Amino acid sequence: PVRPPIVEKGWLWTAAAGLAYALCCAALAQGLVRWTALEGRVDALAPFAALILCLLGGCFLDLSGVSPAMARLALLTPPGLAQAASEGSAKALAALFALGLPRRR
């Protein structure tokens, strides 16, 4: 019988990666709001930032076929970390949680 990929790779890794990715995106959004001086800038910047992060993170194509350097660069973006974490990378999952969890001041 054919099993869905989410079962083969481990549904727990995928769920944890999804949660960590959501936390990381929320932290990025809060950072954008804090760093921009005008209200309209966030509305204009958010779609471009999301598109660039998704392109660099390998959401639209397999970057390992393009260049090994691009595949490593994808691990510097939240989408790339989420993809690696869903495939079972504990380091990528820890990095996503570290980026997404609030910090004490």
Image (cartoon, helix red, strand yellow):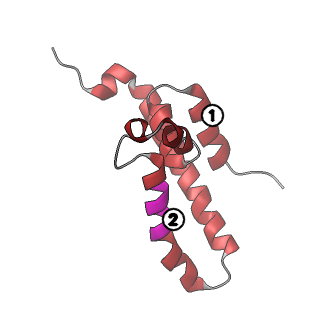
Residue 101 on image: x %, y %: 66, 47
Quarter of the image for the C terminus: give it.
Answer: bottom right
Residue 25 in picture, x, y percent from top left: 54, 55
Identity of the amino acid at label 1? Ala
* Number of residues whose C-alpha sits closer than 10 Å to that of mark 2, classed few (under 14), some (14–19) or many (20 or more): some
Residue at screen point 45% across, 39% down: 67
Query: On the image, numbered disc 1 is attached to which residue?
Result: 94
Disc 1 to disc 2: CB gap under 8 Å: no
Give the residue pinned by disc 2.
49
Q: Secondary structure at mark 1?
A: helix
Chief SS of the magenta region: helix
Question: Where residue 35 sits: x, y (%)?
Answer: 69, 72
At x 75% / y 51%, what residue is drawn?
A: 103
Residue at the outermost right position: 105
Report the residue that reaches farthest toward the left.
1
- 97 in relation to 4, above or below: below
Q: Is residue 1 magenta?
A: no
**What segment is highlighted magenta in the picture?**
47-54
